[in-house]
């Protein structure tokens, strides 16, 4: 009987299953955004705190905290992460700092703030890369100079607003300006902030080092107090009696000029009142008189009535007067912003033409293209033509160095006047467009730093305020209120000596800026030669354990 063959049943073959759906690229990106929100929020808050360090708030210690916060938030991050953190820091900073531009339009405020924040974005990326180098607080301070160097020049001639030095024009750091100008002040502030960040890192985590933290904190204090060791020269070689006339304007804002001749009549009448007080023996006769930028709203060389009105006022006061006005030329499409020495006997003489017109405010780049899409630019009917020489002129017994309005923010323009023999600095300005917005206070702070940097008295003449007399030590000896007609009279020192900052010129800025670039190059080179181990290396703590 045949043995039956047992046939094995085949194993069940599992049904093929579709792979689990992978997270979409959009979902992964959204997860990254959510994870980075805390760090982004802290960066934005730090930017706002830095803005509070500047006038009109003047909470200057916040400039150190702003630097420290950005250093901590970028430490140990990738270059791209640092870029975003720097931008998140920079945009709210500039939006608050430049809020005075809202008079022109919030679109202008936002546009300029975005452009300026891009420089801080690059700074954030550079801080992230160099945070892995030994001695990174030093490279942090150098990179702040590199960022300011670039932003002061690019694009279209640059925009220096928001330099750390301009938040520290009446602080223990200020005397350092006499050694290395505004760049050295920025460097010291940034170094203090970075050392405070380093100290904070040494007080946390498993690698705590309280002694090292104390040494870093002492270094920050040393940078703060170093300014007290710097002599600020103030001794006068001679003196001059000066009167500053602030005639005021009919209406603050974009249409401050009012009807033709109104601003000119305000300044002429104020000068004639001063002349009457002199004749009555109420005040001493000055040696010179300073009128502000745009104190004549008409060209005295093409308008006979404007010339006659200026001549009447200057003859009444009887001393040389610096008059600010717009002069037609050199062609029909251009106008020149000038300060003119007006003698009571011989009339107009030497003049200075503003060298650095403001883009989109005093001239329109790419005019033919932009005018088609931004109709508001039609308000700038003619472009301002830039001058080709500095503002050193003889005004009566004083050899002055004239700079006009925003030019006070540019190192080289002010320095050039002192190098050419200016014994006192004059800032002719018209802040009527930005009255009561905080902008006049910011410009006053810049003038205070220039006084210390060059050891010169600074005379600010503004159409509507703030006019001021600043001593060579940066102290405000007299000032006016905004939107009031006023005259200031003072005896100010004329100085021939130069500071160390005058003699070394731009060398400190270039040296420190290049140091920041070299640090970036070294960091990239080191990163290519060795791959970082997984995790955060010892001594490279960041905020990652607290903030994603």
Image (cartoon, rainbow, N blue to C red):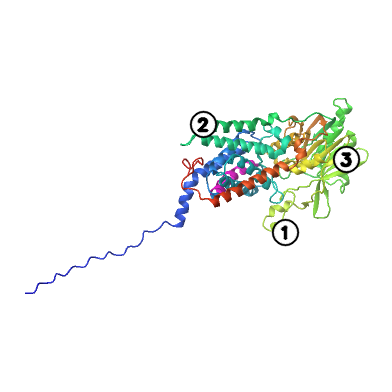
Structural crowding at the residue carrying mark 3, measured as other residues with C-alpha within 10 Å and reported as few (<14), some (14–19) or many (≥20): many
In the rendered image, which quarter is residue 421 located in? Answer: top right
In the rendered image, which quarter is residue 309 located in? Answer: top right
Distance between the Cα atoms at labels 3 and 2? 66 Å
* In this view, the mark in front (1 or 2): 2
Sequence-wise first label, 1 or 2: 2
Q: Give the range drawn in magenta.
A: 81-99
Q: Is 210 placed left or right of 280 in the picture?
A: left
Do the numbered discs 3 and 1 sit on residues whose CB atoms are within 8 Å?
no
Q: Residue 342 carries which label?
A: 3
For the view shown, which residue lies furthest in the left direction?
Answer: 1
Distance between the Cα atoms at labels 1 and 2? 62 Å
Q: Which mark is residue 368?
A: 1
Q: Is residue 381 shown to the viewer in this render? A: yes
- Main SS of the magenta part reads helix
Q: Is residue 293 shown to the viewer in this render? A: no
Image point (49%, 45%), residue name: 37
Distance between the Cα atoms at labels 3 and 1? 37 Å
Structural crowding at the residue carrying mark 1, measured as other residues with C-alpha within 10 Å and reported as few (<14), some (14–19) or many (≥20): few
Sequence-wise first label, 3 or 1: 3
Do the numbered discs 3 and 2 sit on residues whose CB atoms are within 8 Å?
no
Q: Residue 30 carries which label?
A: none
Structural crowding at the residue carrying mark 2, measured as other residues with C-alpha within 10 Å and reported as few (<14), some (14–19) or many (≥20): some
- Above or below — where is 92 with respect to 231? below
**The residue tagged with tag 3: helix, strand or loop?**
strand
Q: Name the residue under label 2.
A: 210
């Amino acid at each position: 009987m045949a043995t039956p063959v047992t046939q094995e049943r085949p194993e069940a073959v599992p049904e093929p299953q579709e792979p689990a759906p992978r997270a979409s690229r959009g979902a992964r990106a959204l997860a990254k955004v959510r994870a980075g929100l805390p760090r982004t929020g802290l960066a934005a808050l730090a930017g706002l705190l830095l803005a509070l360090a500047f006038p009109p708030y003047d909470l200057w210690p916040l400039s150190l905290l702003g630097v420290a916060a950005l250093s901590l938030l970028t430490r140990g991050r990738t270059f791209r992460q640092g870029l975003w953190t720097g931008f998140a820091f920079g945009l709210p900073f500039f939006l608050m700092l430049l809020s005075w531009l809202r008079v022109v339009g919030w679109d202008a405020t936002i546009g300029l703030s975005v452009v300026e924040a891009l420089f801080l974005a690059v700074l954030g990326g550079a801080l992230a890369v160099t945070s892995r180098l030994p001695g990174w607080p030093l490279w942090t301070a150098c990179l702040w100079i590199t960022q300011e160097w670039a932003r002061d020049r690019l694009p279209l001639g640059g925009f220096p607003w928001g330099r750390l030095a301009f938040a520290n024009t009446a602080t223990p750091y200020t005397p350092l300006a006499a050694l290395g100008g505004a760049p050295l002040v920025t460097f010291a502030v940034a170094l203090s902030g970075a050392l405070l960040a380093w100290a904070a890192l040494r007080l946390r985590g498993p690698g705590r080092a309280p002694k090292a933290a104390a040494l870093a904190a002492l270094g920050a204090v040393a940078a703060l107090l170093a300014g007290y060791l710097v002599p600020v020269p103030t001794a006068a070689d001679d003196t001059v009696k000066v009167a500053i006339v602030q005639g005021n304007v009919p209406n603050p804002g974009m249409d401050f000029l009012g009807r033709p001749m109104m601003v000119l009549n305000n300044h002429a009448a104020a000068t004639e009142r001063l002349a009457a007080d002199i004749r009555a023996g109420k005040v001493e006769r000055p040696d010179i008189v300073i009128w502000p930028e745009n104190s004549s709203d008409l060209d005295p060389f093409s308008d006979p009535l404007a010339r006659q009105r200026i001549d009447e006022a200057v003859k009444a006061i009887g001393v040389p007067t610096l008059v600010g006005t717009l002069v037609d030329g050199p062609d029909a499409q251009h106008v020149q912003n000038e300060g003119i020495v007006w003698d009571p006997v011989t009339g107009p003489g030497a003049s200075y033409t503003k060298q650095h017109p403001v883009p989109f405010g005093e001239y329109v780049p790419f005019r033919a293209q932009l005018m088609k899409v931004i109709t508001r630019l039609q308000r700038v009917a003619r472009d301002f033509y830039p001058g080709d020489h500095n503002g050193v002129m003889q005004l009566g017994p004083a050899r002055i160095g004239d700079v006009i309005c925003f030019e006070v923010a540019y190192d080289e323009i002010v320095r050039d006047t002192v190098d050419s023999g200016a014994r006192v600095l004059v800032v002719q300005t018209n802040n009527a467009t930005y009255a009561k917005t905080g902008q006049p206070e910011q410009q006053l702070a810049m003038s205070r730093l220039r006084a210390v940097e060059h050891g010169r008295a600074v005379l600010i003449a503004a159409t509507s305020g703030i006019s001021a007399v600043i001593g060579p030590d940066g102290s405000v000896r007299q000032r006016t209120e905004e939107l009031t007609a006023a005259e200031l009279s003072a005896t100010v020192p004329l100085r021939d000596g130069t500071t160390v900052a005058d003699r070394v010129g731009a060398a400190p800025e270039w040296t420190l800026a290049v140091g920041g670039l070299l640090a970036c190059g070294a960091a990239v080179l080191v990163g290519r030669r060795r791959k970082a181990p997984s995790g955060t290396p010892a001594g490279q703590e960041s905020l990652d354990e607290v903030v994603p």
